[in-house]
Amino acid sequence: MPTDSVPKLVLISPVNEATVAESALAPRLSSLRGKRVGLLDNSKSKADNMLDTVAAILNARYSFTNIVHHRKPSASKPAAPEAIKELASTCDLVIVGVGD
């Protein structure tokens, strides 16, 4: 049987090559004293409790000037752009909490 009439198969590899995004770490703060802190809760169980506890411990030690709270709609969804914008413009550092 001639091979001309045999349908050809096209194989596609399901493996995707990773692309690495260029990024840089944020500069380190020289101190936490008097800083404005953001808390971003991922909405999982007890993430809010953990963040509040960490913030209270750090605040007792460093006397933050402000603490801003935000909560994601769910762990699998990104934070609202408005929340990210507020955290970026009003906070010196942000702590992200993952619960469970």
Image (cartoon, rainbow, N blue to C red):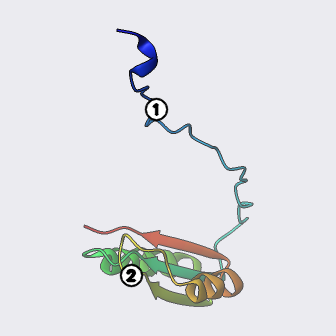
- The residue drawn where x is 47% and y is 70% is 96
Vertical comparison of 44 with 6: above or below: below
Local packing at callout 1 (Cα closer than 10 Å; few below 14, some 14-19, many 20+) is few
Q: Nearer the viewer, residue 77 or 14?
A: 14
Instruction: Name which of mark 2 and mark 1 comes first in the sequence.
Output: 1
Quadrant of residue 19 within the rendered picture: top right
Helix, strand or loop at mark 2? helix
Quadrant of residue 91 within the rendered picture: bottom right
Q: Which mark is residue 52?
A: 2
- The residue drawn where x is 63% and y is 88% is 86
Residue 57, how many percent across, how many down? 43, 76
- The residue drawn where x is 64% and y is 72% is 32
CA distance for labels 2 and 1: 47 Å
User: What kind of residue is marked 2?
Assistant: Asp
Q: Mark 2–mark 1 contact, CB under 8 Å?
A: no
Vertical comparison of 54 with 27: above or below: below
Q: Nearer the viewer, residue 90 or 1?
A: 1
User: What kind of residue is marked 1?
Assistant: Ser
Residue 4, how many percent across, how many down? 46, 17
Helix, strand or loop at mark 1? loop
12 lies left or right of 100: right
Q: Which mark is residue 13?
A: 1
22 lies left or right of 48: right
Which of the image's four quarters has the C terminus? bottom left
